[in-house]
Image (spheres, rainbow, N blue to C red):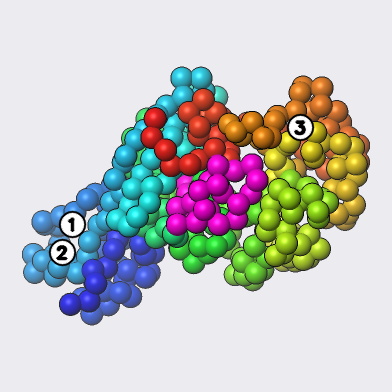
Amino acid sequence: MPPPVLLKDHTSAELTAALADLKLPERLVRQLHAAAVRRGATELPVELPNTSWRLLKQLRERVRIPRLTLVDKVVSPQDGFAKYLFRGEEAGQFEAVRIPLLHRPEDQKYVVCVSSQVGCALACAFCATGRMGFQRNLATWEIVDQVTQIQADSEHPVRGVVFMGMGEPMLNYDRVIRAAKILSEPCGMAINAKSITLSTVGIVPAIRRFTEERHPYRLIVSLTSAHSEKRASLLPIERVHPLPELLAAVREYHAATNKRVTFAWTVLAGINTSREDAKALAELTRDLPILLDLIDVNDPTGQFRRPSTEEADAFRDALREELAMPVQRRYSGGQDIHGACGMLAAVTH
C-alpha cells in the first residue's frame, strides 16, 4: 500500500492529481480541503450529499488528516499576544505566535507568526532559536496546521501570516511556498496572498528563485548592519552570502516586481545605531526604494540591549536624514511570555 495522502500537506490541485485514479469531482476535493484546512476537521465524513458511500470509503482508505499536538499555550496579560507550543509526528517542538490587531472595532483580526523549522542552523547572535541549533524542517501540513489550530482557538479571524517564527523559511523553501499556497487558496484559509510574508536573513539562491517564480507573497530581508564585518559577527550567513551578493539579488527582486524592498534591522544598543551605520545603509541601498523596519532586540541573556530612548531617537533622525526612505518601528509584543522576535525556543511555561 502506498503511504496515505495527507490533507493539509497539498494544494487542492496536488490533491486532485494524487487521487486522479478515483476520478474525484473538483468540487469534492475543494470541499474536503476546506473541511481539513479551514474548519479543522480531524477525519473524513461518513457521508456527503451527492457522494457515494463507496467513494467515501475509498477516500478514507487513501487519505489521512494529520494534526499537531498542542503542548502548551500562554497569553500575555500585557498586550494579548499568545504563544502556542506544538509537537508534530516527528521529533522536536516548535512555536507559533498569535498577534492581535484589535485597534479597529470594525476590523478586529489576528496575524499568526509561524515556524518553518525546529530550531535553526544560522546561529544569529541575538536569537534564541539560533542557539538551539537545527533539528529538522517542518512538513507543509505542520506549518498549515499551526494556523488552522490557532484560528479554531480564536475569537476573530486570522487575516495574515508571517514566516518569522522558528527557523529560516528559505532553507525549507518548497514546503514553505506550498504552505503559503494552501493558506491563500479559496478552499484553504483564504488569506490574501499579499498578507503572507516570508522573512529571510539572506539565502541568496532562494531569493533569486522566489523572484523568478513571481510569487505574490511579501518578502522581508533581515539586514541589521550595512558593514560586512559587523554583520558577519551578528549574522554568520554574511560569510556565505556577503552583502554585495545579497544586494544584487534584492535589486533583481525589485527590478522584476517593482516592489519597494523591506529590510528588517534589529536594533542593538551601542552596536548598530550610529550615524555612521545610517550612512553605510544609505550607501548600500543607493537608488533602491526600501522600507526599513526597526525591531528592538529581545535577548534575555543580557548580551544585547535595547537602546535608550535618546539613542533610538537619534538613530531614527539619522536614518531619515541619510536614507530619505520610509522608516518604521515594528512593535515586538509578547516579551513577557518569551513570544517576541528572537525569543522562540520551544520551552513550556
Where the C terminus falls, by quadrant? top left
In the displayed orientation, state which residue is furthest to the left. Answer: 53
Quadrant of the rendered image containing residue 138? bottom left
* Residue displayed at 86% across by 42% down: 277
Q: In the rendered structure, which amino acid carries the disc numbered 3?
A: Ala
The circle on residue 60 is 2
Q: In the rendered structure, which amino acid carries the disc numbered 1?
A: Leu
Q: Is residue 116 magenta?
A: yes
Q: Position of residue 300 (x, y in %)?
A: 58, 31
* Residue displayed at 55% across by 42% down: 128
Sort mark 3 into few (<14), some (14-19) or many (20+) by Cα contacts within 10 Å.
some
Q: In the rendered structure, which amino acid carries the disc numbered 2?
A: Arg
Where the N terminus falls, by quadrant? bottom left
* Residue displayed at 19% across by 69% down: 62
Q: Tell me which label, 2 or 1, sits earlier in the chain.
A: 1
Q: Is residue 218 above or below residue 99?
A: below
